[in-house]
Image: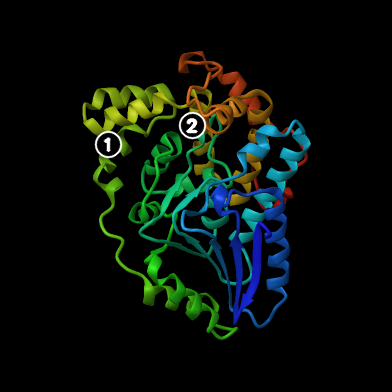
């Protein structure tokens, strides 16, 4: 079976990620197949919408295929993967037809890149949405530095640095999703979308989703909003840690402990990228910045060590370099923000990077 199932069901173009045993981890080949399918769907006047889902019961997509990245000694391959992946993420954000993404179950990293920029983003009661990259020596990419700064207050800073997962209510609260549809109602969603007239447009798709959507319930992050906004308002990680230590609440103490378990360099780089993303006018500007930082982190950072500890040896004891926050060199971070390859996007699409 192919890693991607592309099909037409009535007036619906379907994209089904098909690596359930690997939590539908995204490969370069899958990126290419999705892009080709979008070409095909765009040219089909009979299609009302496009729907992205993941096969299996565990999730939409756990992120990029980290094992392939680790095993590869060809940095050119990694560069081309990120280049094509980020272009696809940007294409989804402005796709010509209504694009619906269902984040049922685990949706992380590259899965957020595919779904988080869609016009219609659905979560279910099983959703676990996260950008956990600081735990593997990386940073929130695939447009994460565009999405996270646009969450309410400093909740995006909190999520980007800690990597904590969001359930349905928090994903909607943080502007990563638009509606909660119960997993049991997803077959009804597919049937209703496939029955739409070709000219239904976004309004027609939205009507279908609204009919099936339910209240996601309380928002756990909202209960900690005051602490998050106060402690994560700083532009230096050590100031955030100090504010959490001074707060005195159990939540602040647990959050501080979580941050101290992450790669120190990744925390500094992530915070820098989030602040730059907050001032960016376009998604493409964030993706462009992330692309060059990705190349730097792969060549000089902790990414390979993080993947080793989490995915290869699974010993959960990464040896970060440097091992402590006070040893992180700001000049090194500044160099990682410089361009390292040809741009992903024409400058007209990014504005000031």
Q: Which residue is drawn at 63% across and 79% down?
A: 47
**Secondary structure beneath disc 2?**
helix
Q: How many labels does the image show?
A: 2
How far is mark 1 from mark 2, CA to CA?
Answer: 22 Å
Of the image marks 1 and 2, the number of the one nearer the N terminus: 2
Left of 28 or right of it: where is 266? left
**Secondary structure beneath disc 1?**
helix
The one nearer the camera, 25 or 208, is 25
From this viewpoint, is residue 46 visible? yes
Locate residue 211: give its quadrant: bottom left
Image location (x, y in percent) of residue 262: 45, 27
Q: Residue 227 carries which label?
A: 1
The one nearer the camera, 169 or 27, is 27
Q: Name the residue under label 2.
A: 135
Left of 278 or right of it: where is 27? right
Image location (x, y in percent) of residue 1: 67, 60
Q: Is residue 220 above or below residue 294?
A: below
Locate residue 11: give its quadrant: bottom right
The one nearer the camera, 293 or 254, is 254
């Amino acid at each position: 079976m192919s890693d991607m199932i592309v099909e037409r069901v009535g007036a619906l173009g379907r994209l089904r990620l098909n690596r359930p045993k690997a939590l539908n981890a995204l490969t370069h080949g899958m990126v290419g197949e999705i892009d080709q399918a979008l070409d095909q769907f765009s040219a089909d006047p009979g299609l009302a919408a496009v729907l992205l889902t993941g096969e299996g019961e565990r999730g939409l997509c756990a992120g990029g295929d980290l094992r392939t990245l680790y095993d590869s000694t060809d940095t050119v391959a990694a560069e081309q993967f990120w280049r094509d992946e980020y272009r696809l993420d940007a294409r989804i954000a402005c796709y010509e037809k209504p694009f619906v993404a269902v984040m049922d179950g685990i949706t992380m990293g590259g899965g957020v890149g595919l779904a988080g920029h869609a016009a219609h983003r659905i979560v279910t009661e099983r959703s676990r949405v996260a950008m956990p990259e600081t735990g593997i020596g990386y940073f929130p990419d695939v447009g994460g530095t565009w999405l996270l700064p646009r969450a309410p207050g400093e909740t995006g800073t909190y999520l980007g640095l800690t990597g904590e997962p969001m359930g349905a209510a928090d994903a909607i609260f943080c502007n990563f999703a638009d509606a909660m549809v119960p997993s049991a109602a997803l077959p009804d969603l597919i049937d209703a979308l496939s029955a739409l007239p070709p000219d239904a447009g976004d309004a027609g798709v939205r009507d279908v989703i609204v009919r099936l959507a339910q209240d996601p319930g309380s928002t756990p992050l909202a209960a900690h909003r005051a602490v998050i906004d106060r402690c994560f308002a700083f532009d230096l990680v050590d100031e955030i840690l100090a504010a959490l230590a001074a707060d005195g609440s159990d939540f602040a103490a647990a959050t501080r402990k979580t941050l101290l378990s992450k790669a120190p360099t990744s925390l500094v780089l992530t915070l820098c990228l989030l602040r730059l993303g907050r001032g960016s006018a376009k998604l493409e500007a964030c993706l462009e910045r992330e692309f060059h930082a990705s190349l730097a982190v792969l060549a000089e950072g902790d990414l390979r060590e993080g993947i080793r500890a989490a995915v290869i040896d699974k010993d959960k004891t990464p040896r970060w370099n440097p091992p402590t926050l006070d040893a992180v060199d700001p000049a090194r971070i500044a160099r990682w923000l410089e361009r390292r390859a040809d741009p992903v996007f024409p400058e007209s699409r990014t504005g000031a990077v």
